[in-house]
Image: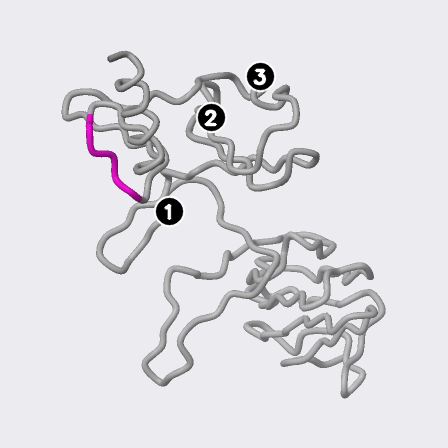
Amino acid sequence: MKRLILLFCLVTTGVYAQTGIGTTTPDVSAKLDISSTTKGLLAPRMTAAQKTAISLPATGLLVYQTDAPTGFYVNTGTSASPVWLRISNDWTKSGNDISYTAGNVSTTGNLTGGNASTSTISGFAANVASIAANYSITSADNGKVIQSTSASAITLTVPTGLPTGFNCTVIQMGAGQITFSGTYLNRTGFTKTASQYAVVSILHLGSNSIILTGEMSN
């Protein structure tokens, strides 16, 4: 009788090749099928340091990190070179729209979008910075509008080493004329804003080729 039971178990294992917990009919596509309407699956919980200390974690290994930033992490790298990726829950999805309300979103690749007359971009207003004395442009000014409110003349230095593609707009809002200092290219050889409310653009094309153009004079 015991031999018959053992034979039956071996045949059943060979036919299904799955394991069921809470079910006698595990899904044929699953190696492990856990079925319950009252309980969940609890993954290993650990700190970031404990997660990092796992020896040779398998690709696809999943753990729950208990310290910040908390959440599920999966190793998307290899055992020899683990890359722990957090399964983010910061994004809010509504229909076909997603939004992110905390922190920063960055990319080292390309951002692509629609290329039609109806395509729009919103929510990316330029920052306006005010100066009232001599000032030197920095990489943090990329994309900004810099307005001078000075009543007397000031000097705005355009340094080398700005990132390729750098651009900003300078506006003389005050009565004081702005003199631009530095190595740059200008079609007319002008070095100053033309007058109050003059607008000048600064563009860096790479290899320290910096263009100043707009309402300028000497």
Left/right placement of residue 164 relative to residue 127 reads: right
Camera sees residue 68: yes
Task: Identify which residue is drawn at 80% across, 83% down.
Answer: 189
Name the kind of residue labelled 1 in the image: Tyr
Name the kind of residue labelled 3 in the image: Gln
Residue 188 spot, x, y in % from top left: 77, 87
Task: Identify which residue is drawn at 55% across, 21% down.
Answer: 48
Q: Which mark is residue 115?
A: none
155, above or below 77, in the image:
below
Residue topped by disc 2: 63
Q: In this view of the protein, which residue sits in the foreground, 53 or 216? A: 53
Residue 216 spot, x, y in % from top left: 68, 80
Residue topped by disc 1: 100
**In the displayed image of the protein, which residue is found farthest to the bottom?**
188
* Principal secondary structure, stretch drawn in magenta: loop
In the image, is residue 109 part of the stretch drawn in magenta?
no
Left/right placement of residue 104 relative to residue 98 reads: right
